[in-house]
Amino acid sequence: MNAHRTPRLLALGTLGTVTTALAVLGVEAVAAARREYVDPESAPSVAGQFGDTAGREVRLVLLGDSTGAGVGVQAVGETVGGQLAQRLARRGWRVHLAGVAISGSRCRDLGPQVSRALLGRPDIAIICIGSNDALRGARLPAIRRSLGTAVERLTAAGVHTIVATCPDLGAARSFAQPLRAIASRRGRRVAAAEAAATTAAGGESIDLGRLTGPIFRADPGTLSPDEFHPSADGYRLWAEVLQPRVEAAARRRSRSGSRDPGASDGGRPRRG
């Protein structure tokens, strides 16, 4: 082979490989976009009261995207918020649960959610966000800025804020390879940006991807039928990871006496 032609041939071969890979990714992205996902309207209302009326009171609010809204399950008790509320209720708390999360939301959409959440004077806020930022190519500085502002507003109002960062998108069986691997890498970068912004703004972050991703990858039952949103078992895993942080925050609230003194019992307690 002519030595002078070799670099050019290698370059052409590499270009051909890249072009083919991009074409494959394009086809996979179109297929993923056209796939039938769980209807967001099927999600239950993330709201209710859990626990004995004599229990220590805590107000919990869920913000964020479809995972905070409970897309993928049918009953409030199956959502991550509902499962957390039930766990706290079994530990002696009386939980007022509210949800303002909206399916499809990115970090830039949190502003109105924060305003709605603050109307309920919550003690603890949990933000589940990041997947849409990762999948739609949101810029990392914009993610840090938007999420940081949301956390700052909540903490300034005295709300203990916990951010559940972008989950492991590599577990989403709705994506074919190599699109799934690319989404996974992008999700990790978004999660890191979210964690940094949360800490800087005075909140707590929990790395859902690292803590629960391996189980989601190994167990198809952690995903709903659309193979993207969590199932009741998937949300249960998230609740297990979140519970120690949420309960610790509730205990600090109880000791400081900073819970809302004007809250009413709201009637007979119920469980979702």
Image (tube, rainbow, N blue to C red):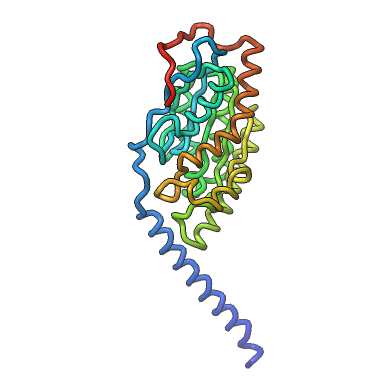
Q: Quadrant of the C terminus?
A: top left
Of residues 23 and 178, the one drawn nearer to the viewer in this rendering:
178
Q: Is residue 82 above or below residue 181?
A: above
Q: Residue furthest top?
A: 262
Where in the figure is residue 136, as x and y percent of width and height? 47, 48
Instruction: Write the residue at 50% across / 18% down.
Output: 51
Where in the figure is residue 212, as x and y percent of width and height? 59, 44
Q: How many marks?
A: 0
Of residues 30 and 215, the one drawn nearer to the viewer in this rendering:
215
Where in the figure is residue 264, as x and y percent of width and height? 46, 8
Of residues 260 and 94, the one drawn nearer to the viewer in this rendering:
94
Where in the figure is residue 20, as x and y percent of width and height? 48, 72
Going by the image, does 185 lie left or right of 79?
right
Instruction: Write the residue at 53% across / 34% down.
Output: 146
Which of the 4 quarters of the picture holds residue 112?
A: top left
Q: Is residue 149 above or below residue 157?
A: below
Q: Quadrant of the N terminus?
A: bottom right
Instruction: Write the residue at 58% across / 26% down.
Output: 161
Which of the 4 quarters of the picture holds residue 247?
A: top right
